[in-house]
Structures are given as C-alpha cells and as structure tokens.
Image (cartoon, grey):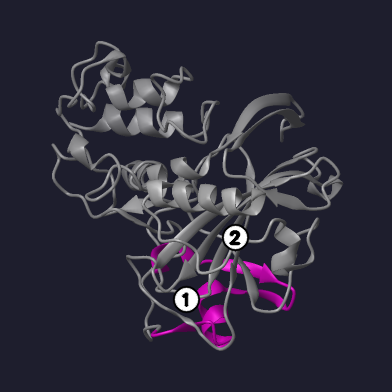
Amino acid sequence: MARKLKNLFLFLIITLCGFSYLSAEPYKYLSEYNFFTDIKNQIPSNNTIPYKISNPLFSDYSYKFRFVHFPDEQPAKYSYQDIFYFPAGATIIKTFAYPVDERSLEDGFYLLETRLLIKNENGWIPLSYIWNKDQTDAYLKYTGQTFNLSWINKKGEERKVRYRAPNVNQCKTCHEINKNIMPIGPKGRNMNINFIYSSGEENQINYWKNQGYLSDVPKKIKPNPAIWDNNDHIIGNRARSYLDANCAHCHRRGGSASNSGFYLDLLEKDSVTLGIFKTPVAAGRGSGGLKYIIDPGNADESILLYRMLSTDPGVMMPELSRSLRHDEAIPIIRDWINQLE
C-alpha cells in the first residue's frame, strides 16, 4: 500500500507540473544511476561528460558541477542558438556546492543538491537529489530543502547564505518554454569555450564532436556572445549577456514571464520590449514606485536595477535561487543603464 501511495504521489506531482510521467520509477539515491566513479568528488564515469557554460546563472555564489550522461552511441545534435537536441535516455546533471575556502578550492566543497533533467520519449523530467550530511550520497526529494551555511570567499571573508533547493513544482519557473520543460545551458553559443578534461585542455564543442557525443557541427563555429565579467567586451554587450543568462529563461517569448511583454534574450532588438521606457504590467510593491523598467540614463530610477538590488522575497529578481545580491554584476547593469540615451 505504501508503495502504491508513493507512486500515486509521484504521478500526481509530475502531472500537476505539466510533465510526462517517467517510464520507470526514478532511483531513490543518486549513486544508483552510476553517473560517477567517485560520487563525492564528482568524478564522472564513462558516457558522463563534464562541461561548463560561458555565462552561468548566478545562484548565491554557489559553484556548479555540470555533466551530461549519454546513452550508448547516441550523440546530441548541435545548435548555436537553441539547446542541443539530446536523445532519449540522456540526463543533464548539475550539482550545487559551496567551497570550504574559495581561496583554496583543494580544501573541498560541501555538496547541497544535484538536479537531474532526464530525457525520455515524451520530454524532460526534472528531479532533485539532496546530499546527506556525511556527503556520501544524495537522496531523491520532491519538496525542496533549505540550507543555512557559510563559506570563506576569495577575499578571506566569511559569507553566510540561506540556500533553497526548489521543489519539483518550481522547476517549471525557469525551465518551461511554451509549456514544455527544457534545459537552459547546453547550446552552441554557451559552449564554445575550453574545458580541462582528464586528457588535457580542449574546446568543448570539438571534444564532444571528436568523442562522438555531438553531431551536425558546422565547419565554422560561431563565436560566443560577450562574457559578462570579461572587461575585453563593451559594457552594453556584457550587460545583455548577463541579463540573457539570468533573466531570459523566464523573460522571453514562451517563458513563464512572457505575459510581462518584457524580454531579455539576446535576440530581442525592440527597445520597449527590452524594457526601455516600458511601464510594468503590474505596478505592485515590486516596482518600488518607479515608472519604467529601464529609465535610460537613470539607473537608480529603473525597476530592473531596483529589483536586482533587493533581497526582499516579494521584490527581488530572480525570485528563485537567490537570497544575496550579485555585487559584481550590479555595477555593470547600473553603468549600462546610465549610458543609455
């Protein structure tokens, strides 16, 4: 009876989230998938490929270890603008962690959660595994969890954070596009950077292609957009890349915030749709009494910056995966708005 109730609960929660039901019951523990040869140190097994993206989402300064597990002899298909097309059986893996001391990463990490996106014939299934206190394994949990912890940052300062692992129903906030759950990161314009593999440093797209994990790669690969924290790029391009990575998964056509008419993906060119002299759809507490989402030349009168500065849950943006301000990014957005005519 207990097993039947558990399966019914799983069916209901996935159905309510708009997901297709798994063809098989997910494993209770992360170790059962055999994604890693050393799970605590996140050492991948065969067919599990580590990767990184050029403009990652800010999540309260947490570190993220990213992997894709491929089914045997079934590569993904390359796309520059959109997510690679992954075969059924592929799993995207992302572990969130904080270093003991950011000045010495060799001292280790405290692992919090590992999120999976599992591809089946009907689409993507999100699951979250919470790490135990002994850091020996992670267990499946649908309802999320809150962690209160601290770490030493690069300046030698102790930072405290209230980190929240989302419940399964919150996954669609960021991952739902046109009512379908989709990955966000692994696309051509995020992946054309080097990664240090066990065999040495190599461009990620070339490595995936040479290892047989990526097909349909063009002979000439387009370059990445600007990297937001790279001073070699102009401030406007850096700001747009940051907003694309941190906001556009919701603020885009078909995203969970599409009814706002405020879109921040890199393809957007219309100034009003980008928020310039645009009044918000709902002028509640989140607007701060300000008139425009972006008031050109006047960052401190812009709702966009006001919500980035806030840590009030009823005001701040993004709503999920953040309780701290991103101190390094705020000056870039402020300078970009102030230079707009």
Image quadrant in which you'd find residue 194: bottom right
Q: Residue shown at 40%/61% (left/top)?
A: 20
* Horizontal and vertical percent position of residue 213: 53, 82
Name the residue located 77 percent from the left edge and 29 percent from the top edge: 156
**Picture quarter with the C terminus:** top left
Nearer mark to the viewer, of 2 and 1: 1
Q: Secondary structure beneath disc 1?
A: loop
Residue for point 59% across, 53% down = 4
Q: Earlier in the sequence, mark 2 or mark 1?
A: 1
Q: Between marks 2 and 1, how big is the CA–CA gap? A: 15 Å
Q: Can you identify the residue that label 1 sits on?
A: 88
Q: Nearer the viewer, residue 166 or 258?
A: 166
Question: Would you say residue 190 sits in the magenta stretch?
Answer: yes
Asked if residue 234 can be seen in this view, the reply is yes
Q: Local crowd at mark 1 within 10 Å, few (<14), some, or many (≥20)?
A: some
Q: Position of residue 270 (x, y in %)?
A: 13, 45
Q: Hey, what amino acid is under mark 1? A: Ala
Q: Position of residue 318 (x, y in %)?
A: 42, 33
Above or below, 52 against 133 in this view is below
Side of 272 where 182 appears, left or right: right
**39 or 200, which lies in front?**
39
Query: In the rendered structure, which segment of residues is drawn in magenta?
Result: 188-216
Q: Secondary structure at mark 2?
A: strand
Tell me: residue 183, above or below residue 131. Answer: below
Tell me if 318 is positioned left or right of 251 in this view. Answer: right
The circle drawn on residue 93 is 2
- Image coordinates for residue 104, horizontal then vertical, percent: 81, 44
Q: Is residue 103 left or right of residue 220?
A: right
Identified by mark 2, the residue type is Ile
In the picture, residue 223 is in which quadrant? bottom left
